[in-house]
Amino acid sequence: MSQTISRHIKIDNWIFEVKMVRALRVDNYGEPYTAIANISLNGSSGYIDGIMQKNHHKISEDDVRIIENYCKNMDVSQINVEKNNKYLTIHSEEQGVAQLKLA
């Protein structure tokens, strides 16, 4: 899947804009999930406000790749994470905020 998803939907004289996403790692919606991520979207940047697994281990590279793929589909070119997030492996760091590289 590599198409861009629109973040703006117009219904009558209202425009709805996606600014925050909650991602759950689960096979079927409504079942207990094993990981969660909250992602705020602002322009071409995403900010992971929180991410963790139920077992409190680091998020796998496969999971990071899936989140990166979702962000690309939302037309995000940069993902920022708090540098003290112990659940992610950080690629670069700048002024207290870490960045995940989008290929």
Image: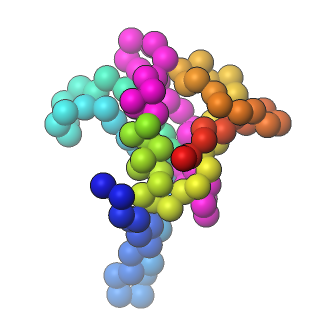
Image location of residue 59, percent across then percent down: 46, 23
Q: Is residue 27 above or below residue 10?
A: above
Is residue 39 at all visible to an observer of this figure? Answer: yes
In reply to whether residue 92 is colored magenta, the answer given is no
Image location of residue 46, percent across then percent down: 58, 50
Residue span colored magenta: 40-64
Is residue 82 at all visible to an observer of this figure? Answer: no
Q: Could you tell me which residue is drawn at 25 percent across and 31 percent down?
A: 26
The quarter holding residue 86 reads top right
Q: Is residue 43 above or below residue 11?
A: above
Query: In the image shown, does 24 or 62 lie closer to the viewer?
Result: 62
Q: Is residue 88 above or below residue 15?
A: above
Outermost right residue: 95
The count of marks equals: 0
Q: Could you tell me which residue is drawn at 49 percent across and 17 percent down?
A: 58
- Would you say 84 lies left or right of 51 here? right
Image location of residue 64, percent across then percent down: 46, 33
- Would you say 29 lies left or right of 62 here? left
Q: Could you tell me which residue is drawn at 42 percent across and 87 percent down?
A: 13
Q: Is residue 59 above or below residue 2?
A: above
Q: Name the quadrant of the N terminus.
A: bottom left
Query: In the image shown, does 51 or 62 lie closer to the viewer?
Result: 62
In reply to whether residue 45 is colored magenta, the answer given is yes
Image location of residue 16, percent across then percent down: 43, 71
